[in-house]
Image (tube, grey):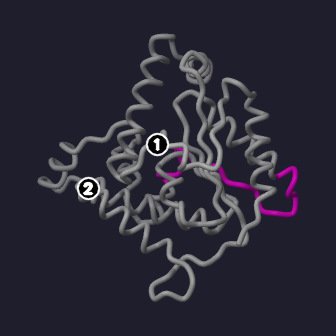
Amino acid sequence: MIANLPVENCLSFINSQSRTGDQPGAIIKPAVRRSVTISRQAGCGALVVAERVAGYLKQHLPDEPSWNVLDRNLMATVMEDHNLPARLAKFLPEDRMSQIDDIVSDLFELRPPASEIIRHTAETILKLADVGNAIIIGRGGNVITARLPHVIHVRLVAPLENRIAHSRRFYCMTEYEARKFCLEMDRGRERYLRKYFGADINDPLLYHAVINTGLVTYDYAAKMIGDAILNSRPD
């Protein structure tokens, strides 16, 4: 039983959107293309890997449309898809979720509650994954699309010191800032998935593969994911 109402609403929505076959109300049909979701620890190079996956697939599938990497631009897509003001995207980062903020916002009608934006996000992610050729980073994409047979789910991890080093280079941070960034982002993403989807982000059973970018290069991680996509058989 799910005690948190927003989580219950999200799961109910996902289940209704994920039905296949001739059931009444079914809207997701079998896809002929593939998509991938990438869950990640902060600082393990997810965006770099995702972009290299897109390039690897373009090289091996030259006649297919380009693969789209959806990370920070995903929320802009959600806002546009549901005719919401773009400024609302800043209210729902994965790393900062506050029930108090939701209550205050609801009382004063300052913006849609977080659960409503989560619903819109789930709907947009499902659409993007169903169209195919989408690389979706974060936002619970692996849980949202769990029932779509043509979507591969990957989790990227790495030792903390490796992630700190990457964050220092990639975001031009000090060592202190990079360590704080990695730890806070990880905790925030764990809260996000637990609060809105009732899932443990660290559960390996949620993924087809868990890849340690502390043990393999970003290029090799991208090749592993790309080969998994190329070798999969969409329904």
Where is residue 10 shown, x and y percent of the image? 36, 62
Q: From the viewer's perspective, is the residue at label 1 or at label 2 nearer?
A: 1
For residue 183, above or below residue 57? above
User: At numbered mark 1, what does the secondary structure look like: helix, strand or loop?
Assistant: loop
Write the residue at 65% across / 55% down: 152
Question: Local crowd at mark 1 within 10 Å, few (<14), some, or many (≥20)?
Answer: many
User: At numbered mark 2, what does the secondary structure look like: helix, strand or loop?
Assistant: loop
Where is mark 1, residue-wise?
201
Numbered mark located on residue 113 in the image: 2
Where is residue 79 shown, x and y percent of the image? 43, 58
Where is residue 175 shown, x and y percent of the image? 51, 11
Residue 168 quadrant: top right
Left or right: 2 in relation to 142? left
Where is residue 187 shown, x and y percent of the image? 39, 32
Left or right: 75 in relation to 234? left
Any magenta on residue 43?
no
Q: Quadrant of the N terminus?
A: bottom left
Left or right: 217 in relation to 153? right
Q: Which residues are magenta?
A: 58-76
- Identify residue type, mark 1: Ile
CA–CA distance between discs 1 and 2? 23 Å
Write the residue at 57% across / 84% down: 21
Any magenta on residue 59?
yes
Write the residue at 67% across / 54% down: 68
